[in-house]
Amino acid sequence: MALLKTIHKRVKASTLMETLVATVLIVVIFMVTSLILNNLFAGTVKGNTREIETRLDELEYRVKNNLLKLPHSETFGTWNISVAAEGQGPYREVPATGNGYKDVILKAKRENSDQNIDRKVICKEDDKTR
């Protein structure tokens, strides 16, 4: 018992002000950390274009195999997709390339955002569309 009394030393107590300052610092550090993590995860979710890329792949396949009548437009989730031969549209004529190929442009634009995805596909011309 005497040995325990000699080992036990008193720790100097902190004042109330020191305790409050330390608590505020810890809370501020946690708040800043949570805001940084929130921004990182929100940016990752907004930048995820896997679903629209897959849909554009499907449309590209249909264009290359002449399974899609051009011009074509659709809405996919929050994306507006348009598919048209180059030069196709009102008051425009499709240029005659003479080589049996045509350029098709796939455009996807996200609503309420500046995010755009553009693709250009070169495929064989075929008068028959199914």
Image (spheres, grey):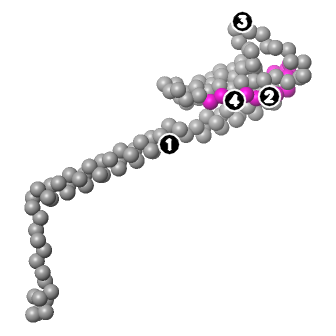
Query: Is 25 left or right of 1, judged from the image as shown?
Result: right
Identity of the amino acid at label 1? Thr
Give whichever of 56, 17 is nearer the camera: 17
Q: Position of residue 27 (x, y in %)?
A: 25, 51
Q: Quadrant of the N terminus?
A: bottom left
Above/below status of 95 relative to 102: above
Q: Position of residue 23 (x, y in %)?
A: 20, 55
Identity of the amino acid at label 4? Arg
- Compute the Cα span from label 3 to label 1: 41 Å
Query: Is 95 left or right of 79, judged from the image as shown?
Result: right
- Compute the Cα span from label 2 to label 1: 32 Å
Residue under label 3: 91
Q: Quadrant of the C terminus?
A: top right
Residue under label 4: 119
Residue at x 58%, y 26% (from the top left corner): 109
Q: Are marks 3 and 1 in contact (CB under 8 Å)?
A: no
Report the magenta residues as a range. Answer: 117-130
